[in-house]
Amino acid sequence: MNFKEKLLLLFILILGFSLRFYGINWDQTCCQHPDERAIVMYSQPLKLPNNLDEFISKDSSLNPHFFAYGNLPLYILRSVSNFAGNFDPQLATYNQMDLVGRFISILADTITILIIFLIARKLFNANAGFAGSFLYAVSVLPIQYSHFFTSDILLTFIISLLLLFVINFYQKPQLKKAIIIGILFGLALATKISAIPIIISITMAITLDFLFVFLKSPHKPKTWLGHIPHVVRKLISEWLLILLIAFITFSIAQPYAIIDSKEFVDQNMLQSMMTKNPYIFPYTLQYVGKIKYIYELKNIFLWGLGPIISLLSLCGFYLVYKKFKKMEQTKKSEIVIIVSFLVVYFGVVGSFAIGFMRYLLPIYPILAIFGGYTIVRILDYINFQKINDQLKNILKFILIVSILVWPLSFITIYSRTNTRIEASNWINQNIPNNSTIAIEHWDDRLPLFTSNNYNFSELTLYDQPDNKYKWQVLSARLKSSDYLVIASNRLYVPIQKLNNCSRYRICYPIASEYYKSLFSGKLPFKLVAEFTSYPTIPFTGTKIIDDMADESFTVYDHPKIFIFKKIP
């Protein structure tokens, strides 16, 4: 790389870091993301055991007793926050540990941008590396999740690094590379057990040469039979070694998956059941009726990447497919290694009965790489046209601006006060002391903070069955309330959808009618305040209405909030 190329890469890294760091304290450390809140809550009490006997006990002070996610992010957060606490004691407390975690996410995702450059340069060329890393740097969902501390950004970082090493291992197999791959695989599993599909890329790196020989002449056994003993030896010596190292690493990074194995298995089985049955938890009812794969593709296209980057990625796959047969075998293999992971991971996650957008974050780097390849082809096409340089520069400018519109529109969310903070301030200023406020269960209570003495009446709308007795209780609570706060769309969207008892196993016909009556003004409650923070296109002020996006895209950092007042 020459000086200009290094400068360009540095600019992309700074751009990605800045977009992720901007508005890092967007919720004033109120932990509005429930996964982040859970990680902080279970990390905070962790401490080193006093002796070995305590360490190997299920009741160890290092056992978080929480396995819905991997334990590695918890240990990283506790360790880094303890270190940060030497400079500011507040950073080691529950109230500000989320800021430490968010900075970890920002650093991890910024390094992922660099890894994408390295992978794309290997697959195509340096220009594709710059373009691919740029696309990921400005992709909305990675930017959004770098504003939280969850396991998904760390998992994306580790898997991206693992793919880079797998490609290097394919090019030149070495024992030390196999050990590094095993370590990274173990760390990925300790971050989130859903990293298991990466095994397909590891396997491909070991067996691809044989597969290409077989696919070239499947009808000529003499051509490929002689390669089988070599492949078997490689699988035994390399594949099993990687798995062994991965298991050892996993055991070290998440020891209580072994020591407290029953709790680990039970919690992971519950998470597995959730992926197959959206009726298990109230917060997954939004996914009842989800069309597998289509739902995920829609959210990537409309929100996660946005239409422009999504189209660039799609075109990239098509362009590579058209060129694939003419590529040398090494390049073919490298592409198969990363695409096989994308296909298998998307195939597994897309088949889930639930569709949280963050689940697919690990494939975003690959989508960016192929989108970057499209950009290179577009720029080459523009450069070879017989038009003046000024027009060429205008076309390139239009391309860059069209890419930047989506992330710059989304980042405006962090330039404004979070809607829940804004609503909390409004409540404290406008709702009298000692008032009774009706709130919905399975959602965050508003106001988040107050010096007033409010009484809260919880509306258990998700309770079953949805019958007259339930509504006698809820009606009495509504009748005794002075105000009603709807803090997000967590309840009213899925409940209004689940109104047909002949179609859905769980249904809410009365609750659905309640919401219709409330929003149409038929109930004795008047809408007195509404808080929104939609992504806004810069310079135009045009709002991008994302009410129909996946709930997890809006509910954490820019939920829509309604406040109703009882009409006498």
Image: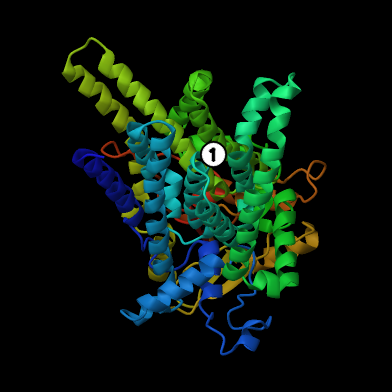
Q: Is residue 154 above or below residue 374?
A: below
Residue 471 lies left or right of residue 244; in this view the side is right
Q: Position of residue 347 (x, y in %)?
A: 65, 39
- 73 and 404: which one is in front? 73
Does residue 296 appear in this view? Answer: no
Q: Residue at x 41, y 78 (%)?
A: 82
Q: Residue at x 65, y 21 (%)?
A: 216
Q: Residue at x 37, y 60 (%)?
A: 26
- 152 and 438: which one is in front? 152
Disc 1 is placed on an element classified as helix
Q: Position of residue 186 (x, y in %)?
A: 59, 59
Instruction: Give the position of the N terminus as an image quadrant.
Output: top left
- Which residue is denoted by mark 1 in the rendering? 299
Quadrant of the rendered image containing residue 420: bottom left
Does residue 274 appear in this view? Answer: yes
- 325 and 352: which one is in front? 325
Classify mark 1: residues with Cα within 10 Å, few (<14), some (14-19) or many (20+).
Answer: many
